[in-house]
Amino acid sequence: KQEVTQIPAALSVPEGENLVLNCSFTDSAIYNLQWFRQDPGKGLTSLLLIQSSQREQTSGRLNASLDKSSGRSTLYIAASQPGDSATYLCAVFTGNQFYFGTGTSLTVIP
Amino acid sequence: GAGVSQSPRYKVAKRGQDVALRCDPISGHVSLFWYQQALGQGPEFLTYFQNEAQLDKSGLPSDRFFAERPEGSVSTLKIQRTQQEDSAVYLCASSSGLQTNTGELFFGEGSRLTVL
């Protein structure tokens, strides 16, 4: 069974810092990987989708990379802002379902 | 619709009651997923539909859980004889893609079920 792990579980940084969130998965046979953010009491908001043939995707201050062979992805957030505070989840798609990690809870301190 | 819509947003049920949770996916989205999310955890897969066909229901925790999507659009997740361990947020998501070429996944706000 595919297992997805996210490190660290929680992260607190001062405003303006660049940061990296990590996601690893055990089975490299994936079709794509997606990063989401979740605010308390809310659903998940899609941030970036990386197809299995791609190495990275960028959207604004966010950059996600994918190394499928080693089972790893990183989400890079540049110049963090207090509004970035949320839980960030990665998910890999294997054909019938997305497998999720437990998330990284990010707090950006003003 | 503009996004995935779920109802009710909050549901309180007494143990043993049946509940029905509704999901309206984004118009035209072929794929629909149901997930269960416990507090502080990532979403756990329940079931997957491609149009009206339920292609994977391996995540349904017991035979008290049943999902349908009869016309390939709106889906309903039904839980019979609810138990306290069923308390969770139930998330619905839809995608325009198919199994091997799924597109971006869009989630609804979720239905929070509390079983007393």
Image: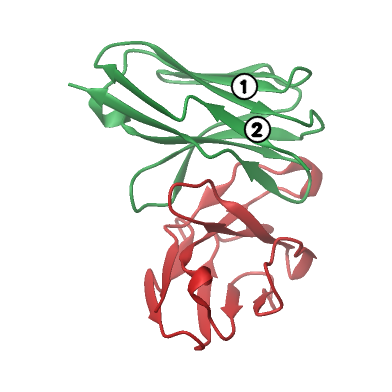
Chain colours: A green, B red
Q: Which percent across, then down, holds residue A46?
A: 50, 39
Percent across and percent down for residue A99 are 66, 43
Name the residue rendered at 58%, 75% in the picture.
Answer: B76
- In depth, the one of B7 and B17 nearer the eye is B17
Residue A85 in the image: x percent, y percent?
Answer: 31, 31
- Label 1, label 2: how far apart the Cα atoms are: 8 Å
Query: Where does the N terminus of chain A fall, quadrant-wise?
Result: top right
Q: Say whether mark 2 and mark 1 are on the same chain.
A: yes
Which residue is depicted at the point 75% across and 30% down? A26
Secondary element at tag 2: strand
Kindly state the secondary structure of the residue where label 1 is placed: strand
Q: Amino acid at mark 1?
A: Ser
The answer to whether residue A23 is left or right of residue A95 is left
Above or below: residue B68 compared with residue B100: below
Residue B97 image label: none
Along the horizontal axis of the image, is A95 left or right of A77?
right
Q: Left or right: B91 with respect to B109?
A: right
Q: Badge 1 is on which residue?
A: A73
Kindly identify the amino acid type of the residue bearing the numbered disc 2: Leu
Return the chain for callout 2.
A
Residue picked out by circle 2: A33
Choose the circle earlier in sequence order: 1 or 2. 2
Quadrant where the C terminus of chain A sits is top left
Residue at image point 53% right, 49% down? B106
Disc 1 crowd rating (10 Å Cα; few below 14, some 14-19, many 20+) is many
How dense is the environment of label 2, judged by Cα within 10 Å: few (below 14), some, or many (20 and up)? many
Corner quadrant of residue A73: top right
Q: Please tell me whether mark 1 or mark 2 is closer to you in this view.
A: 1
The chain containing the residue under callout 1 comes to A
What percent of the width, then of the height, locates residue A15? 24, 16
Proximity of marks 1 and 2: CB atoms separated by less than 8 Å:
yes
Residue displayed at 27% across by 12% down: A16
